[in-house]
Image (cartoon, rainbow, N blue to C red):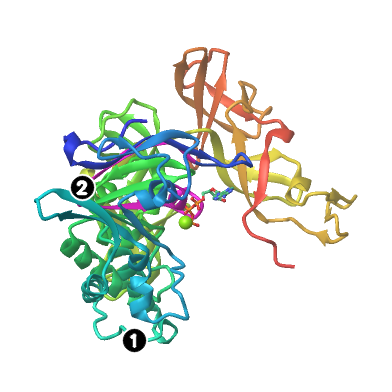
Amino acid sequence: MADQRKDNTVKKDKIIEIVNLTREFEDGVVAVDDISFYVRKGEFITFLGPSGCGKTTTLRMIAGFDKPTKGKILLNGEDISYLPPNKRPINTVFQRYALFPHLNVYDNIAFGLKLKKVKVTYEDKEGKRFEKIEKLSKAEISSKVEKALKMVDLEGFEKRSVSTLSGGQQQRVAIARAIVNEPKILLLDEPLGALDLKMRKDMQLELKEMHKKLGITFIYVTHDQEEALTMSDTIVVMKDGVIQQIGTPTDIYNEPKNSFVADFIGESNIFSGTIVGDKKVRFINHNFDCVDEFKINEKVDVVVRPEDVTLLDAGEGQVDGKIISSIFKGVHYEMVMRVGKAEIVIQDTIERKVGETVSLLIKPNDIHIMAKEFSSNKYDGYITKRNTVCFGDGEFECDVTQLYPGSILDEEGYLITAEGERIDLTDVDVEVEVGLKDIEISDDADKGGAIGNIVSMIYKVDHYQLIVRTDENEEDFVFDTEDTWNENDRVSVIIPKEKIKLSLKQEIKR
Ligand SMILES: Nc1ncnc2c1ncn2[C@@H]1O[C@H](COP(=O)(O)OP(=O)(O)OP(=O)(O)O)[C@@H](O)[C@H]1O
Ligand SMILES: [Mg+2]
């Protein structure tokens, strides 16, 4: 994948370029999956993503502690993929910063410098130049350590034993130890992870300051979106070893590329919607005007930020609903409004009381639409007394024993778990998943579990993708078929018992 940043960074501005970088571990785990991006000289770039998405692995390859399975890493245009770490002008600050507990602050920072050898050029009497490999002098080391200590605001701490320092101070020593080598690039892997919230916030600002003063490139790793938004020039959002989006904090916040990014960055309401006309999208049973153009009938994810929903008196906005919770958050109130089954999070400085019926208003510009990566139908459902499952405005036969591996049903319809426990599943909430190939329809209304109209038929190379929508709650059944139907046909939806995948919403209290 090519770098997704839209800009015209010229080659000389790129300090690091990553090309199709992949790391597959021996056990088959692909931690980093064909990623490409570049880092500008002097930039503060942040890798952001959930645990296990491949952030550390990427950083380790840039530092030289790990080698790519495929792809390469260029530093100023030169391939450094297989260069050992100490040959790279790169230093790393790790989450577990591993200071030497028996050394004082000064010696911890000076440790690397004492081992360092540098080329020094001399001139002999005849003016001929020659080079010698030398260690740094005591005075040179001392001046470098002092400079680094000043940078992290720990002047006067030289003699202190590191074991007597607070977490934040230890972290500063770790940073000083990394910058004392004067690297061109500083890698920071969740450096503030071990600190408490207050300390973290302070250190975020300090690190940002330090970045400015040092003028070098920072490559930062965090799973904290707020941290990434406050500190970075550029954010790289990762998931499952793949880059989801690269952009400035504003880009990523305002124009998330997909629902994962939207969900991960900041709070957001994500609705399942359908394009119903030219710049018109339907969700929560209302047609909203929007600004993005999509194909009619396309299933989309609609993202609306809590601060972009305006509340008006009942009847005055686009959709009415009820406030079901309200919490004061210091600057604004965070309220939840229920519309049908949807719960919408809203932030506003004016409070609406719980129980009040209000109306919401969302401006076209604040509706962000993303193509859905649609791979299966998902519903909220519940189990009935008859051990069938209700979802999608219908009722279907299902196999409830899949909820508890090894369980069976007794003659009274109670579930007996593998451990011999007897469970009444009546009214238990479940998540239901049905594949795109597992739905059939019939024009015989009694044959299926739900009834609706065909609202869309899209020809997809070798099959049709149909959407059947129910009347009551406008639930959709999306499926592939080779048969030809007509739009607006009234049909019933048939799903074979064994194709209905159930999972418990939460462990049943017993
Ligand atoms: N040496 C290894 N051998 C096998 N699998 C590994 C190894 N190192 C990492 N992994 C796996 O690679 C994936 C990515 O790990 P990585 O440490 O890069 O994630 P991360 O984004 O840094 O997560 P976190 O936020 O938890 O630090 C994980 O599934 C992890 O279990
Ligand atoms: Mg990590």
**Image point 39% across, 84% down: which residue?**
165
Secondary structure beneath disc 2?
loop
Tell me the residue that label 1 is attached to.
159
Viewer-proximal residue among 62 and 359: 62
Q: Residue at x 69, y 50 (%)?
A: 383
Q: Reading the chain from its start, which is encountered first: label 2 or label 1? A: 2
**Secondary element at image label 1:** loop
Q: Over which residues does the magenta segment extend?
A: 32-57
At horizontal 44% and vertical 50% (from top left) the residue drawn is 60
Which mark identifies residue 41? 2
Residue 420 position in % (x across, y down):
88, 59
Q: Is residue 424 left or right of residue 357?
A: right
Residue 4, image x, y percentages: 29, 36
Front residue of 314/373: it is 373
Is residue 302 something one can see in this rendering?
Answer: yes
The percent coordinates of residue 264 (x first, y second) are 40, 53
In the rendered image, the residue lying farthest to the front is 126
Q: Image quadrant of residue 94?
A: bottom left
Q: Is residue 58 above or below residue 190?
A: above
Apparent side of residue 288 relative to residue 85 in the rendered image (left or right): left
User: Identity of the amino acid at label 2?
Assistant: Lys
Depth check: give the residue in front, 222 or 158. 158
